[in-house]
Amino acid sequence: MTFKHAIAISISVALMAGSPTLTFGAGPTVVMTKADLKWKDMGNGVEAAPVSGDMEKGASRFFLKYPVGLVTPRHHHSADHYATVVSGTITLTMGSKEYKLGPGAYFALTKKASHTAKVEGNEEAVFFIQADGPWNVVMEK
């Protein structure tokens, strides 16, 4: 299973410098508290907190945080990913269909599914994402 969701920014190599890198599969058991998360600024108020893998080089697991009021442009990701909303509320738009998603909601974005996301209300939105491959954002025209 894999997770991923983002906005129109690319993650630089410097972003991931010093973040934890773990191998998927038969690796060590990992336990992280909220206080253990190391949030990295990705621009436009978006932050990522790596949990395992390398977001730039391959499969990974990470938290992604969107600020209040964020609206992403239409985009897709090259690698399949799956996400669970941890907190906050978003409207995910795919084609002409809108989905209002809150804590506990799950969505899969596969096969380069084009989408936008809008943070609703007065609370930032946090997702847990698992990506099959390198994390990128490809803008749609």
Image (cartoon, helix red, strand yellow):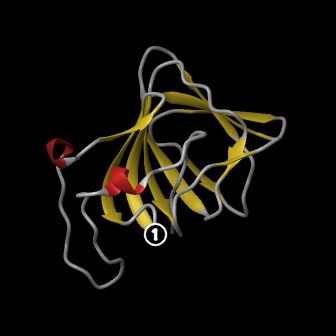
| Residue 76, horizontal then vertical, whole percent | 69, 50
Q: Is residue 78 left or right of residue 83?
A: right
The C terminus: image quadrant: top right
Quarter of image, res 23 = bottom left
Q: Is residue 135 visible?
A: yes
Residue 87 visible in image:
no
Q: Relative to 43, is 74 on the left or the right?
A: right
Vertical comparison of 57 with 44: above or below: below
Q: Position of residue 126 (x, y in %)?
A: 41, 37
Residue sitting nearer the eye, 81 or 89: 81
Instruction: State whether residue 119 is above or below residue 24.
Output: above
Residue 117: percent from left, percent from top: 63, 34
Q: Amino acid at mark 1?
A: Lys
The residue at which mark 1 appears reads as 57
Q: Can you name the residue that lies furthest to the top here?
A: 122
Q: Give neighbour class at mark 1: few <14, some 14-19, many 20+ (Cα, 10 Å).
A: few
- The structure residue drawn at horizontal position 18% and vertical position 55%, both measured from the top left corner, is 32
Looking at the image, which residue sits at the far bottom? 26
